[in-house]
Amino acid sequence: MDLSYAQSVNVSGCSFTDVQGNLNIYNGPVSIHHPERDPLDRLRHEMISYETRHSSYGDPSGCMPGTRVQLLSDLVSWTLDDSTPRVYWLAGMAGTGKSTISHSLCEILDARKMLGASFFCSRGSETARNARLIVPTIAYGLASTSPAIRSDIIKAIGDHPRLAEPTYINVEDQFDKLIRRPIQTSISRNLKTYKVIVIDAVDECSDLRFVSTLIRLILKLSFDLPLKLFIASRDEELIHNAFYSSQDLLTAFQLHEVEKHVVVDDIRLFIEKSLLDIKSPGLDRTLDAWPAPFELFRLIEHSGRLFIYPATALRYIREGGKLFKARLSDMANREPKLRRKQQTSMIDDLYGHILQQACASKEEGEILPMRRLLSIIIFLQNPLPIYALTEFAQIDAEVHLSALTAVIHVPTQPEAAVAPFHASFPDFVTDPSRCSRERCPSFAALNAAECHIILALSCMDLMNSSLKYNICGIPSDMTVSRQGRVNLPDHMTKISEALKYACVYWASHLVELQELGSDILPLIRHFLVTHLLHWIECLSILGELETALKSLESANIALLRSKATDVQCRYLQSLVEDALRCLQSNFEAVQRNAFEIYQSAFVWLPKGSLLRKVYSPVPYSLPRIVLGLHDSWPPANLVLRFDSGVLTVALSHDGSQAASGSLDNMVRIWNTTTGLLEAELKGHTDVVTSVAFSRSSGKLASGSWDKTVRIWDVRTGELEAELTGHTDGVTSVAFSPIADQVCSGSKDFTLGIWNAKTGVLQARLRGHVGAVNSVSFSPDGRRVLSGSSDTGLWIWNTETGRVEADLVSKGNRAMVLSAAFSQDGKRVVSGTQDGTVRIWDVATRNLEAELKGHTDQVNSVAFSSDGSRVVSGSYDGIVRVSNAMTGELEAEFKGHMSVVSSVAFFQDGKQVILGSLHGTIHIWNTAAREAGLPQHASSEICLAFSQDGEHLACGSGSGTIWIRNAGTGDIEVELEGHTDLVSSVAFSHDGSRLVSASWDETVRVWDMHSTRVVAEFKGHTDSVSSVVFSPDGNRVVSGSYDKTARIWDVATGKVMAELRVAAEVRCVAFSMDGSQIATGLVDATIRIWNATTGEAEGELIGHTDVVWAVAFSHDGSQVISSSADRTVRVWDKTTGQSYRMTTRYLQLLDSTEIFIHDLRWMKTLEIAYPTKQPSALGGGLAHSVSEDGRWILGEERDCWIPPHYRVFGEPVFSGSRVSFADSTGRLVILDMKGT
């Protein structure tokens, strides 16, 4: 390995054998780390404090001396008066000078050592418009005010690293741990005001709902803190309502309601001082009388109460150079061009005049570059610095913007962004009624569609010319797939700002186009067939990979909508869809390491993938899927896996989030695009049986067997209410679509109607005589549907609390487990214990359809949004989508090996989400008729490689055994004979024979040349669980659930010894010399036997659950065992003492190597004995499964396993090959050697 690239090297969890031969313990791959940064750097963000902010008036500045005197004095008094409210809201219209006031207040507080932190929001900066950065920024500022606070904040980040992430969802928890607790711990309670926090222009944040939540949180949590918070914004409705939710905690001031004479006096002073600065460099005595009183009066009159007018006008006058007098006179003497009663008329005239003057004396060819630049600047999603703007537009931006510097800020600092001075200018220049030919004959208003074409073309040109493989020039050995390898922060600095913009935003401009013309379609094709993977690499390095998914979806929409060259668009659309599926399946791996898009992700592309065809062959070596690769993408667009069974799932209204409740008492919120976990909501003390989003998706209700219903804020993760009153477990919850109401059903036979805000129980509905398993509101919120174990399916009036209808199928009563209204409220669907789905007419109460097909109880049902289809999930592990009118089956998904507990349609009806007790959530594409099933009617239950690694034996649930060529995956031999599940297979050492054990109570020995049974051992009286050859191949030992192990003579078929024990035998093993046998039992013990006499020679006690696997060390002195108690132990066979393996790899003194495969529900063993041939991994195992089950680890490279293929059964290894069954039973053979 080339270590010159690293700044420091750390070999984790390893100790090396010394000359005396002590243990060599290895616990993970070599990892390379960069030096530790200050933990507080994770809270630090650029260009958001008052000193570094992006100002609407150029360089950041406060109020001109002598202006806003009274207001600033009042603000200082507020900060010093401990009796005043903790929060001050300065509200005002655009252009009234809020930011300059905030800036001045910061300067005053800073000088007095009272400023705690400042955050100046701006829609012109992606960072500054992200409201989720406000709390971390405040924490960063407060940390610099006190060593004690700094220490507490660092400790909080150390204990909870995700607190520092901008995506941390629980803002209350973040505020509490990063601000509230450190302040309360470090600052004396006698101190009323320690510091003041200033937050400006929160209305310019992109997510005003989150801003509203944050304001409410600040009002709630700040009352007992020695902090005061000053917040400035426009008087937007969401912000206004948030502030006035707690008026007693607030001082509010409307800036635009200041008496006009006060504002006029401040504007007069501002104009007079600014004009004085303009004329002061000159020596002309005629300037003594300038400006004329009339001109000064008119400029003040035109300004009204808006500071933005004189600021813009004076900038225009100043930049006139020697013509400043003429410019002032011209502006003062100009009458409004359009005499309309609009608030914007005066500023519109000013902007129109500036544009017209910029175009004066210019040829059309000179105006076009200026117009192109304005089009780009106004419609950029994120502003760019001048050098990046030049690269992006391929125009000298500085030259062509020189005439527009009165309205466009062109900073002198090279890294600062070029942007309009004020939001009012883009509003003007894009409105034809304001930027009209009358106002500006030479410059027509910008057309949004034309501007997006310019931007989309510029993005495509730049990406096609700049993107390439390994764009950051990372050393080749660092591009190889490794589990622990991640993108490094300094990599992104090697990507230009212009290219960053193009990669992130190209699709947002493309989707605005109604038609893809001949000018852009060839560029799109070149990008998709040449640079698609390079683009994904780039976005991963930039930390913007989720943008890739959204961009591909937008591109798909644009291609689908376009009428140009249908065949070409369809081809490109297929490529985009393929890339979207690839990225969704491998998002977690590619997000961490950009090069996984070329490696692991490419490995698992389906055989028929267009992406595979377009980008093959690859110029580097990759692992190869010998067997088990899908021909096409499976119907499940996304698979989410975790360690606890899922009882319930629900979708947000827009489908962007899914919530789940599980057996581990947790509520989780997932991103349905990326599959990433966004929040874990802790609080329930028993299993979570039901979850439901509110209509706005801002709140989530959860019900649990702990007898409570909890209401959560989805954005913050905050618990808003705990509803108590049920006397038994809650089984179902539902939000009213029109009111702040929640309905709950319980095992106590009742329904509860609750106020979701106050937590007050509004009604208790009684009448059922069995558990209420399902509740659902009608679309108008006036009725509730309940399904019960008493077979009742009732519709209740929520106002009267009475039953309006009892829907019962005559002569066929069964427990109702799930029920739901259609979205028009006219029909009801129910799922019952007898496996039937029924559809009812609400008005007539008649049964419309009875859908059969499930073979076990139906746990969950739902209508599609248009009511045309019904989805049902059953205990039989099958999901069925049926036509709600005809009852015809439209799709059936069988890709599960566990109970389907919950199902729901996405709003568009194209996808279904389902949860299972296996601990998975699937998002299925309903366009697929049938899920990808395992290759055989019965999936492979047990696997074994031959000693030479050339053959793989696969025992199935049907009793058939397949012998596959391990290099091709082809079935070479099919062995029939067993009449029940094959539980264990093993090759003899020379590979000439195979032994198999079955639930049919027999053991069979097969000749691999003739494929015939050469011996059949009968005698066990229960299922045979495990079988293995002796090292010389002359004997076989079998273990059975009949509480015996038997030693068989292969030649004669006779029982040589019967080993009787007190519990079922789960596993057996021979020692390497064949003298002893070990048996692992269901009672958690291990027995050691003499293989010749059958006498017991020892008992090993220490495990607390079933022993899954046993093996001897090479010299026979030690025994290794794995148990359902999730431990692996190494035993001294003589003393019976053991120690628990705490590492994943261990080499014993006799060179026996142990590797643990840590699957979710068990730890499995891989044992390697010393051989004369050199091993692939330092004399040991070549490969293993990572602890989290997400990776296959190898010597030369690792390989990520997508959730679709995640290991379900016990993997087996041979040389460079690994074989395992995935969660659908599909057999996979992966060769890590590479192609």
Image (cartoon, grey):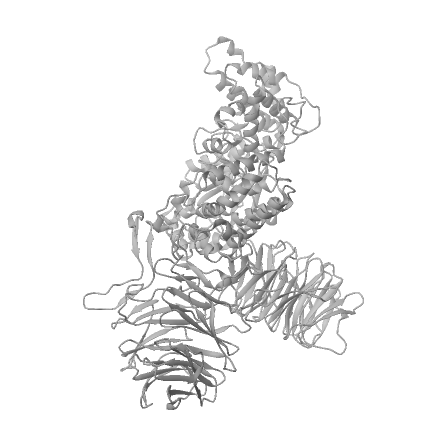
Whether 351 is drawn above or below 185: the answer is above
Report the residue that reaches farthest toward the top. Answer: 285
Whether 416 is drawn above or below 167: the answer is above
Q: Quadrant of residue 422?
A: top right
Residue at 73% from the left image edge and 78% from the top image edge? 812
Q: Is residue 205 visible?
A: no
Residue at 40% from the left image edge and 63% from the top image edge? 1186
Left or right of 755 in this view: 591: left
Whether 475 is drawn above or below 694: the answer is above
Between 733 and 180, the one nearer to me in the picture: 733
Q: Where is residue 678? Give x, y as percent.
A: 51, 56
Q: Is residue 919 visible?
A: yes
Q: Where is residue 587? Give x, y as percent.
A: 49, 54
Report the residue that reaches farthest toward the left. Answer: 19
Q: Count of labels shown?
A: 0
Report the residue that reaches farthest toward the front. Answer: 1010
Q: Where is residue 1035? Give x, y as percent.
A: 35, 84
Between 303 and 1140, the one nearer to me in the picture: 1140
Whether 706 is drawn above or below 375: the answer is below
Quarter of the C terminus within the rendering: bottom left
Between 936 and 1081, the one nearer to me in the picture: 936
